[in-house]
Amino acid sequence: MPGLLVPLLALMDGSRDLATLKTGFELRTGTPVTTASLERLVSALDQAFLLDNKRFAQANARALNEFRSASFRKPILAGSSYPTDADEARSYISRWFNDAQHNALAEATGLQGVVSPHIDFPRGGPTYADVWQCAAGAVREADLFVILGTDHAAGNAEITLTRQAYATPWGAIPTDQGVVDRLAAEAGDEVFDLELHHRGEHSIETAAVWLHYLREGEPFSMIPILCGSFAPFMDGTSPGSNSRIEAMVNVLRSVASQRRTLFVAAADLAHVGPAFGDHFPLDVVAKSALAEKDKEMLQVMSTGTAEGFWNHIRDEGDRRRICGLPPIYLMLAIMTQAAGHLTGYAQCPADQDGGSVVSICGMVYESD
């Protein structure tokens, strides 16, 4: 998109024809533009399916139907974050898993929840391994897994469901359609409006791979839930006041009371540095300061209180861009009387110079 024409996008809300767009753009910018240029731009946007019109609606419907009618949702990280071959993937994950640091929580049973990263495995491998080693016992005894993953493309959508299965190198993990139907009945069919986001979003996949690895072929089912931005709640309202979120929390609490359920928040933490819009790269001192701020947040997370976690992030205006905010909040809201135990923390480079970082953690929650 030519930088000069970017202001034009704000005028393209469906209420103006080309002539009105031309006039509005010239009045706002003082820059003349030809009708032919506008026609080429509109045509290019249309070809890229970036206009909310009939052509886009038809293409979106075709893509959604293709996604739903497939046998499973294809992995998008296989071949880059981990091997596609089943044996190679098992060997790859095993190297991380076997190198994990054992602690007093290793293979603890009776866990309610897990916070696991969703960054790529080469950068986050040790942190993944530490938390999943601690959760291995709970993973093997659970009947149902609810994976709450960040939806990086969702905008202001709260939750997005799918009935599609998720594939890993070891086969397809079925989605429990009965629970999905209960959620949709209570929260409304709008939970499927952005279902196609499941096709290209990686967060749930990262947790599904570790779950499938630990189950070693034993069947299980899961509920994949993508969680959109909580930006609309930054005005002071609580996400828990949203009727759709409230309905989801109530249904999943009910399900967990009847089945051995493990909740997973596939969530990274801070995104800081020029790669994310900050003016200056982080030096050693800044990274240490970030670790201290993250430490404060992790302490709040460990209390297992959703509103306490939300208030902590809201009060600082989410300056560190905690992309795992929605899934972590929702998991904490669903669980009851849970105490969190940190299993690992790391800062992962997000650019070639290391001046931008993504912080990640692992945390497991026991009944308090």
Image: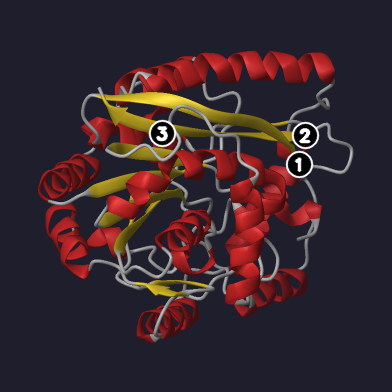
Left or right: 250 as drawn, with respect to 64: left
Left or right: 206 as drawn, with respect to 263: right
Please tell me whether mark 1 sits on a helix, a strand or a loop: loop
Callout 2 touching callout 1 (CB < 8 Å)? yes
Q: Residue tagged by mark 1? A: 350
In which image quadrant can residue 61 be found? bottom left
| Among the two numbered marks 1 and 3 on one chain, the one whose residue lies closer to the N terminus | 1
| Among the two numbered marks 2 and 3 on one chain, the one whose residue lies closer to the N terminus | 2
Q: Residue tagged by mark 2? A: 356
Q: Quarter of the image for the C terminus: give it.
A: top left
Residues packed near mark 2 inside 10 Å, few (<14), some (14 to 19) or many (20 plus)? many
Residues packed near mark 1 inside 10 Å, few (<14), some (14 to 19) or many (20 plus)? some
Q: CA distance from mark 2 to mark 3?
A: 27 Å
Give the color scheme: rainbow, by chain, secondary structure or one colour: secondary structure
Residue at image coords 53%, 56%:
206
Type of amino acid at the residue the image marks with label 1? Ala
In which image quadrant can residue 329 be found? top left
What label sits on residue 364 in the rendered view?
A: 3
What label sits on residue 308 in the rendered view?
A: none
Please tell me whether mark 3 sits on a helix, a strand or a loop: strand
Q: CA distance from mark 2 to mark 1?
A: 5 Å
The answer, for residue 212, to whether it is visible in the render is yes
